Image (spheres, helix red, strand yellow):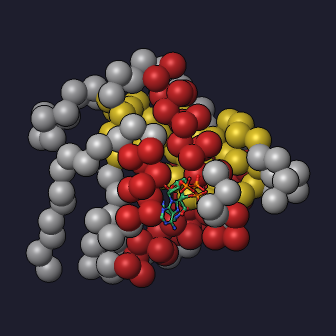
Amino acid sequence: MGDITIRPAVSADLGDLGRLAGELVRLHHAADPARFFLVDRVEEGYSWWFSRELSNAESVILVANDAAKVVGYAYGALEERNWNLLLDAHGAVHDLFVEPTERRAGVGRKLMNALVTELEKKGASRIVLSTMVSNTSAQHLFEGCGFRPTMLEMIRG
Ligand SMILES: CC(C)(COP(=O)(O)OP(=O)(O)OC[C@H]1O[C@@H](n2cnc3c(N)ncnc32)[C@H](O)[C@@H]1OP(=O)(O)O)[C@@H](O)C(=O)NCCC(=O)NCCS
């Protein structure tokens, strides 16, 4: 892997974003199908969703590029106060994904740090994320970026 550039996503990235988001969804579904859905044409659905989010001033979509291709992405957004969650206005990290062949080379951390910077520039004074309890590698990354565990989601059925 060559040098990695982190940059804002553009329309030309929508195919890659849909593909990578699809991998992220499939990974979650495979780990716990009762909790994480897998819809038909998931890649197409996410390309459509990101095409809308690209023009949302409260959203941030970043891609990691090596010389040849997109190897990962991060997606987050500003969210309003949520009374149900007892959570004041915040930045939310929705997605972080790095191609399996490109992992453990610092790309995930670069993406995460850049996403935090961009959400803070947009005014987020706190940033919140959720991750699968079993995903300890991601949790190590997040703790290294200054996050601490808070809530534990539980499901029946
Ligand atoms: C989690 C993920 C984004 C990490 O990407 P990455 O480019 O491999 O991460 P980095 O190389 O920047 O690693 C940063 C730190 O994370 C931790 N980490 C990453 N992968 C790890 C692993 N397999 N085991 C243990 N720790 C790990 C380490 O603390 C690492 O620092 P170190 O290499 O100095 O020890 C990547 O594994 C991925 O895309 N996983 C599938 C999707 C996912 O789980 N997304 C996050 C939840 S939504």
In this rendering, the answer to whether 9 lies above or below 48 is above
Judged left or right of residue 9, residue 140 is: left
Q: Quadrant of the C terminus?
A: bottom left
Which sits in the foreground, 34 or 5?
Answer: 5
* Residue in the picture at 65% in, 51% down: 107
Where is residue 76? Give x, y as percent: 47, 40
Whether residue 93 is visible? yes
Judged left or right of residue 40, residue 149 is: left
* Residue in the picture at 49% in, 33% down: 116
Where is residue 3? Give x, y as percent: 82, 47
Q: Quadrant of the N terminus?
A: bottom right
Judged left or right of residue 129, residue 107 is: right
- The picture quadrant where one finds residue 29 is bottom left
Count the labels in the image: 0
* Residue in the picture at 64% in, 63% down: 103
Which sits in the foreground, 19 or 132?
Answer: 132
In this rendering, the answer to whether 75 lies above or below 29 is above
In this rendering, the answer to whether 93 lies above or below 46 is above
Where is residue 39? Give x, y as percent: 44, 73
* Residue in the picture at 18% in, 50% down: 151
Whether residue 50 is visible? no
Residue extending farthest right: 67
Where is residue 148? Give x, y as percent: 29, 43
- The picture quadrant where one finds residue 84 is top left
